Amino acid sequence: MTSGRFLRSRLSSPKLNFAEFGQIAKVQLVDVETMLEWAKSMTWKGLHPIVDLSRKVYQKVVTLSKRAMHAVEARLERDPELPKWDILILPTAT
């Protein structure tokens, strides 16, 4: 990256499709619509992502009681090699 306003990527990864941008992808991400359209144009394994803008404002601090946190932790499966970063969240029983 040369600056925060430009995104550059080389065709070094076969998983990413930058063919529509040429040999080097250079997109000026100056507004929301440009960013959304750029994100929609990406592909991974031949699939395009579903991209939507959320304007929801979240609370900055959310705390759970110990009982509530135990219920959440019971749904998590942690990878033994990367327990802080690789977590599978199981659905709740309905």
Image (cartoon, grey):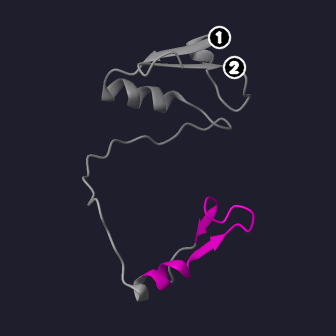
Left or right relative to 84: residue 12: right
- Say which residue appears at 42% left-offset and 89% top-offset: 67
Q: Amino acid at mark 1?
A: Gln
Which disc is residue 11 wearing? 2
Q: Check disc 1: other Cα within 10 Å, few if <14, some if 14-19, many if 20+.
A: few
Which disc is residue 23 wearing? 1
Measured from the top left, where is residue 9 in percent x and y?
Answer: 61, 20
> Circles 2 and 1: CB distance less than 8 Å?
yes
- Position of the N terminus by quadrant: top right
The relative height of residue 7 versus residue 71 in the rendered view (above or below) is: above
Q: Earlier in the sequence, mark 2 or mark 1?
A: 2
Q: Amino acid at mark 2?
A: Leu
- Say which residue appears at 41% left-offset and 19% top-offset: 5
**Does 84 appear in magenta?**
yes
The relative height of residue 39 versus residue 85 in the rendered view (above or below) is: above
Question: Which quarter of the picture shows residue 30?
Answer: top left
Q: Nearer the viewer, residue 68 or 88?
A: 68
Stretch in magenta: 69-89
Measured from the top left, where is residue 46 in percent x and y?
Answer: 65, 35
Distance CA(mark 2)–CA(mark 1): 7 Å
